[in-house]
Amino acid sequence: MNSATARVPTQSGSRYLQQLCKHWSHNLKVEFTPERGTIVFPRDARGADWPADALVTMVAQPDTLDVTIDASSPEHLEGLKNTVARHLDRFAFREAPLSFPWS
C-alpha cells in the first residue's frame, strides 16, 4: 500500500471534513462524524462494493485537519493527493490555498 499524510493547518477542519464527506457521499462509500471521516475510492467505476483501490481518512484536530491517503499504486496516490487538496481548497475558499505538507 502506498500512503501519504498531511497535517493541514486550519481551525475549521471539522467543517471541511463534513463538507467533503457529504460532497463525495453521493458517489462513494463514506462514513463520518464531526471528528473523523473515511472515503473509499473503488478500484473502478463498478461501485463501492468492489475492493477498495484507495482510502482517504480525515481527522479534525483543534488546529489541523489530518488527511491520510492509502492507495494501491503510486500513481493513484499522487492523483488523490491533488484531488483531495483541490476539493478541500474549494470548501476553504476564505483561507485557500491550504498548505498540504505531504509526508
Image (cartoon, rainbow, N blue to C red):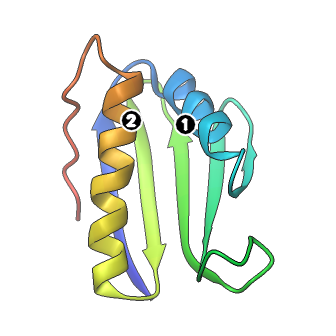
Which residue ends up furthest to the right in the rendered image?
49
At a point 52% along the width and 60% down the height, the residue shown is: 56
Q: Is residue 35 above or below residue 1?
A: above
Q: Position of residue 92 (x, y in %)?
A: 35, 21
Q: Residue furthest top?
A: 94
Residue at label 2?
88
**Disc assigned to residue 92:** none
For marks 1 and 2, the one nearer the N-term is 1
In this rendering, the answer to whether 10 lies above or below 41 is above
- Is 92 or 100 nearer to us in this picture? 92
Quadrant hosting residue 68: bottom left
| Residue at screen point 46% across, 87% down | 72
Q: Quadrant of residue 50?
A: bottom right
- Classify mark 1: residues with Cα within 10 Å, few (<14), some (14-19) or many (20+): some
CB under 8 Å between callouts 1 and 2? Answer: yes
Q: CA distance from mark 1 to mark 2?
A: 7 Å
Q: Amino acid at mark 2?
A: Leu
Q: Amino acid at mark 1?
A: Leu
Q: Is residue 92 above or below residue 61?
A: above
Q: Which of these two is toward me, 10 or 43?
A: 43
Helix, strand or loop status at disc 1? helix
Q: Which quadrant is home to the N terminus?
A: bottom left
Residue 14 pos. (x, y %): 56, 26
Q: Is residue 47 visible?
A: yes
Q: Report the residue marked by disc 1.
A: 20
